[in-house]
Image (cartoon, rainbow, N blue to C red):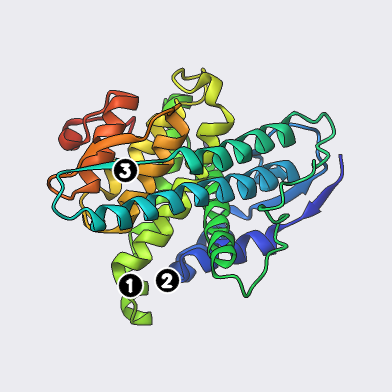
Amino acid sequence: MDAQDYTLSAISLIFMAAPERALELEEDIQRLRPQFRRRDNIGGWLLDSGYSAVNFTDVALQQLWVMAHGAWQAYRSGQRALEEYHALDDSHFVLVDYRLAESRVKEAHALAKLIGEHPRGEIPQFPSWLPSLDQYDETDVEQRAVHDLAKIARAFCFLHELEHLRLDETGRDGLEPVDEEMECDLGAIRYLLDSANIYASSEDVDLTTVMFKRTLGISLALYGVFVLTASEAHLSTSSHPPPSERLAQLVAYVLNTIPPESAFWVVLHAMLATCFDDATEPRVLSLADKDWRVQTVALILELTGHDLTKVHHENFGQ
Ligand SMILES: [Zn+2]
């Protein structure tokens, strides 16, 4: 199987996702000497690591891209719900209609699955609303935003694999494979979020905005994993935790950092609802306290059984 060296591109992608960690990244690269290899498609998802190498195929990149666009459709419906809610200011309830978004979200899900199922990873025709990989219109604000989020999602996936390589070096000390996956997610989450304040103050931008963008990018990656493995969504395999657990870990991590009024919670709620619901009717939410974070936490409880309001007592496999 031929492989194309993608190391410089991968490192620059990680650098762009969290420029404030440049020094740390350089040290990691010096020590781990990772090789990123873009391999020929063999059909199915390939993104793994071992022996200092991170291997992936076009299929994985294409699927992440398509899922990012699917998630964006959920984002739009969440935004619309928020606008409609503001219009219903004296109401304690709001009807959130995700059905329109769902048709496109489901179209993206089906396409991502199709991409994964082709034995040689040939890329099928995209629907007209979905631009092909990296062929986006730079003048279109929405397309540029999805492109940026998809890059963060990709950086998160590469960082997750770097965490595996780090464990190759330091040893696992009896760490179970399922726990290792959660730990690698957490390492990648912390890399992208823990120093966001340094970036925000050096660039003189709002910290909540930086957190919003980065956390949404991570959510896209985990959402993609969720949807692509949806048939086994509530089962863990011997080596991988259920994807909903991985999303719950992310939400638990940002629960007290991203304020309740941030649009992040609206978006995440829509993403989760469109991928878990099979709605035939608009979802009715009680928004008496105007707190979408509360709604999202309730949805996570419904999906995973994790009560994030008691998150400090939870053990997410760390
Ligand atoms: Zn992994």
Residue at coordinates 73% horizontally, 62% vertically from top-left? 135
Residue at coordinates 45% horizontally, 54% vertically from top-left? 76
Instruction: Tell me the mark number nearer the camera, choosing from 3 and 2.
Output: 3
Residue 198 is marked as 1
Asked if one can make out residue 54 in the rendered structure from this viewpoint, the answer is no
Neighbourhood count class around disc 3 (C-alpha, 10 Å): few under 14, some 14–19, many 20 upward: many
Residue 47 rendering spot, x and y as whole percentages: 65, 40
Instruction: Report the number of numbered marks.
Output: 3
| 259 vs 3: above or below | below
Q: Marks 3 and 1, how far apart in space? A: 22 Å
Q: Marks 2 and 1, how far apart in space? A: 7 Å
Q: Earlier in the sequence, mark 3 or mark 1?
A: 1
Asked if one can make out residue 316 in the rendered structure from this viewpoint, the answer is yes
Which residue is disc 3 drawn over? Answer: 251
Q: Secondary structure at mark 3?
A: helix
> The disc labelled 3 sits on which kind of residue?
Val
Residue 20 is marked as 2
Q: Earlier in the sequence, mark 3 or mark 2?
A: 2
Q: Is residue 12 left or right of residue 286?
A: right
Residue 199 rendering spot, x and y as whole percentages: 37, 73
